Amino acid sequence: MQKELNFWEEQMDLLAQQDYVIIDNFFNAEKLNAAHHFFNQKQEEGEFKKAAIGAAGTEKIIREIRGDYTYWLERGRDIELQPIFEVLDEVKSVFNRLLFLSLADYEFHLAHYPQGSFYKKHLDQFEGRKNRMISVIIYLNKGWKTGDGGELRIFPEGEEPMDIAPLENRCIMFRSDTLFHEVLTSNTSRKSITGWMLYQPAVLPYIVL
Ligand code: OGA
Ligand code: NI
């Protein structure tokens, strides 16, 4: 376990109450380092691909909705990320035990938002992707400061929208079916590990996004 049980109990209570929870200092130093290293390596290798959207749109439509580039993770291939997968396993089992969810799997990608890109307001669960239950994002933006942009704006029901700075090693988890959110225009390069806890096993995330 990376974190104590009572820590997780508190976080799950918050998530149940407000549909989201923010956890700072999410990874320990070794895991954070592994994440940065792997991200930079995949970027250098040119492995990121333009992200798609649910209903297969044209390039232009996609660009008006989201401007990020992604690299889908695969446990068997991306062995350098083993320490990260262990944390994701822990998160999945915590959800199942404490929130009585029946999560079967998860799917994650690295996401890079180049300067000037954004992701318009949306839900992560939609027709065609009904099995996404909880969205989990961990930011990797060293030295992020006001003005860098790329905040995550969330729209909790019946409350004012709230902007969350994409600070390095900050994790946000939220309900994929109810919490509307958007990524504000990033004025710098913005990095994250983003994914979803799934009700059913992941099937070809490359084809149906
Ligand atoms: C997404 C998304 C938010 C973020 O990939 O669906 O909403 O802060 N990402 O990166
Ligand atoms: Ni989203």
Image (cartoon, rainbow, N blue to C red):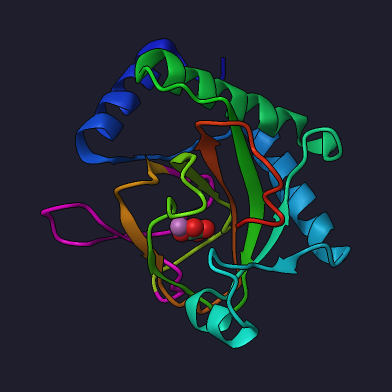
Q: In which quarter of the image is residue 50?
A: bottom right
Q: Residue at 57% x, 82% y: name it.
A: 63
Number of marks in the rendered image: 0
**Horizontal arrangement in the rendering, residue 145 relative to residue 57 (left or right):** left
Q: Residue at 50% x, 47% y: name it.
A: 137
Q: Determine the residue located farthest toward the bottom in the rendered image.
A: 60
Q: What stretch is highlighted in magenta?
A: 147-172
Q: Nearer the viewer, residue 45 or 50?
A: 50
Query: Residue 90 colored magenta?
Result: no
Q: Residue at 31% x, 58% y: name it.
A: 180
Query: Residue 154 colored magenta?
Result: yes
Question: Compared with residue 187, is residue 139 higher up or lower down, i.e. above or below?
Answer: above
Q: Main secondary structure of the magenta part?
A: loop
Instruction: Indicate the position of residue 133 as horizontal and vertical percent values.
Output: 43, 38
* Quarter placement of the N terminus: top right
**Horizontal arrangement in the rendering, residue 18 relative to residue 188 (left or right):** left
Instruction: Indicate the position of residue 198 as horizontal and vertical percent values.
Output: 53, 35
Residue 116 showing in the rendered view: no
* Quarter placement of the C terminus: bottom right
Instruction: Indicate the position of residue 89 as horizontal and vertical percent values.
Output: 60, 24
Looking at the rendering, the quadrant in which ligand 2 lies is bottom left
Residue 77 showing in the rendered view: yes
Q: Quadrant of residue 51?
A: bottom right
Q: Determine the residue located farthest toward the left in the rendered image.
A: 158
Instruction: Indicate the position of residue 131 as horizontal and vertical percent values.
Output: 49, 40
Q: Residue at 84% x, 33% y: name it.
A: 76
